[in-house]
């Protein structure tokens, strides 16, 4: 059983074995597990498990305990799951015969979304998850980068609603397919709770690797593949833009090749500092149902800026939020698209992002270009 500890509201169950539990009450789930394994009743009770969970959460330590039952000695194993700051995001426990086979625990890590920086902090342990290469690891990434790595996912608006408007009690659990460079798909289960307290304004995440040979990979639908290819051939570039925070939250098509939007220390750096206030000012018009146009300077891969026209539309169904659909067009066609040089520096000035990881990722994009 995996018990999430993502918010002060209390513990709940994220998963039991391979099955999701959608924040179920841990005591009820525990009683059902006990009912299926009567031998555990002789040596364990709800109070014992609660104390073990508390010890693992507060002390951030593993726990191994052997106890006697009428069926022979049994064993309790408790393992905390850590986030990027060393805090415990979940506790996993297993109980069974002391001489029985202990199934290997799939990889799991915690992550923290911070609204102010608009980045998802992740520990280095995330590289143990399927589909995450050590060469790609960065301490922080934008939500647009996260979305760009998953395929056949359609709950972007729900996720953005929770992340950018964190309110106590808000939570969601969802699964994503992550494509490796080799084209193989892996699956992650993500449990997220919004937080707006002294620790975090944003959300704490628990990411579980649920990749299994028994589960078929989920690939993009024929409709999404066709639409994306049509946009690519037409040269259309569409993105979801967070107007109030002046950043790109998700690419609806292939990313605009003249814009450096990924592997940035600060996602807002995609737009020139002097142009961000203009995007914020357009928010009221777009929320009112109008479309609006603006020309801004967008960061390119040489470290300079390319004039870019944004035609903004309201995001359907979320007019009360600061999301807008933006069509991006290069204003000056005579300015060549600056593609990154994989052998030299990505930017000529001081680094504004994780350039080494960017080179590795771009090399993979050139070798493999799956539609996602």
Image: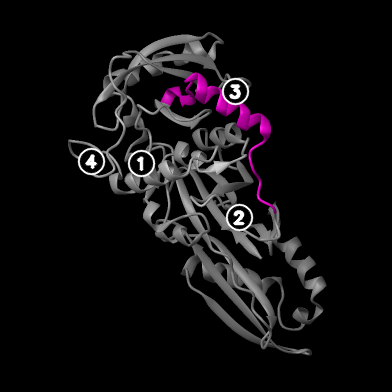
CA distance for labels 3 and 4 = 36 Å
Q: In front of the other: label 3 or label 1?
A: 1
According to the picture, the residue beneath numbered tag 2 turns out to be: 10
Question: Of helix, strand and loop, which one carries label 2?
Answer: loop
Q: Give the range drawn in magenta.
A: 216-244
Q: Decide which of tag 2 and tag 1 comes sooner along the chain.
A: 2
Q: Quadrant of the C terminus?
A: top right
Position in image of residue 149 (x %, y %): 50, 43
Image coordinates for residue 298, horizontal then vertical, percent: 32, 23
Image quadrant for the N terminus? bottom right
Q: Which residue is drawn at 59% across and 23% down?
A: 318
**Circle 1 SS class:** loop
Q: Out of 77 and 178, give the one closest to the viewer.
A: 178
Sequence-first disc among 1 and 4: 1
Q: Do the residues labelled 4 and 2 touch (CB within 8 Å)?
A: no
- For marks 3 and 2, give the CA distance: 30 Å
| Residue position marked by numbered label 3 in the rendering | 318
* Residue 263 disc label: 1
**Residue occupying image coordinates x 54% and y 77%:** 63
First in sequence, mark 3 or 4: give its number.
3
User: Do the CB atoms of the residues marked 1 and 4 lie less than 8 Å apart?
Assistant: no
Within-10-Å neighbours for mark 1: few <14, some 14–19, many 20+ = many
Q: Are the residues tagged 3 and 2 within 8 Å (C-beta)?
A: no
Image-based side of 31 in relation to 61, left or right: right
Question: Which residue does the numbered mark 4 point to in the structure image?
Answer: 351
């Amino acid at each position: 059983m995996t018990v999430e500890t993502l918010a002060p509201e209390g513990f709940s169950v994220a998963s039991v074995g391979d099955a999701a539990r959608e924040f179920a009450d841990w005591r009820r789930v525990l009683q059902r597990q006990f009912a299926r394994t009567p031998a555990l009743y002789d040596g364990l009770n709800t109070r014992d498990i609660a104390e073990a969970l508390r010890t693992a959460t507060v002390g951030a330590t593993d726990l191994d305990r052997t106890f006697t039952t009428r069926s022979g000695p049994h064993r309790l194993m408790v393992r905390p799951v850590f986030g990027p700051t060393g805090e415990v995001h979940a506790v996993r426990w297993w109980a069974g015969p002391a001489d029985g086979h202990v199934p290997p625990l799939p990889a799991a890590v915690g992550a923290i979304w911070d609204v102010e920086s608009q980045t998802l902090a992740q520990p280095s342990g995330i590289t143990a998850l399927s589909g995450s290469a050590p060469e790609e690891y960065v301490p922080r990434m934008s939500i647009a980068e996260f979305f760009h790595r998953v395929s056949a996912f359609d709950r972007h608006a729900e996720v953005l609603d929770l992340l950018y408007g964190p309110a106590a009690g808000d939570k969601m659990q969802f699964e994503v397919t992550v494509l490796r460079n080799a084209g193989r798909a892996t699956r992650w289960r993500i449990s997220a709770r919004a937080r707006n307290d002294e620790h975090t304004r944003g959300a704490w995440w628990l990411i579980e690797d649920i990749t299994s040979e028994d589960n078929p990979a989920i690939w993009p639908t024929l409709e999404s593949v066709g639409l994306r290819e049509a946009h690519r051939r037409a040269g259309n570039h569409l993105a979801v833009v967070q107007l109030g925070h002046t950043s790109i939250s998700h690419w609806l098509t292939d990313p605009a090749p003249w814009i450096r939007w990924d592997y940035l220390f600060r996602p807002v750096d995609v737009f020139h500092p002097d142009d961000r206030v203009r995007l914020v000012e357009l928010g009221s018009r777009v929320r009112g149902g109008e479309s609006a146009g603006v020309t801004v300077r967008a960061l390119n891969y040489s470290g300079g800026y390319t004039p870019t026209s944004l035609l903004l539309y309201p995001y359907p169904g979320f007019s009360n939020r600061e999301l807008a659909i933006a069509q991006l067009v290069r204003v000056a066609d005579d300015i060549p698209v600056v593609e990154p040089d994989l052998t030299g520096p990505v930017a000529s000035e001081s680094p504004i992002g994780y350039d080494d990881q960017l080179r590795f990722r771009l090399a993979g994009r050139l070798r493999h270009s799956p539609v996602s």
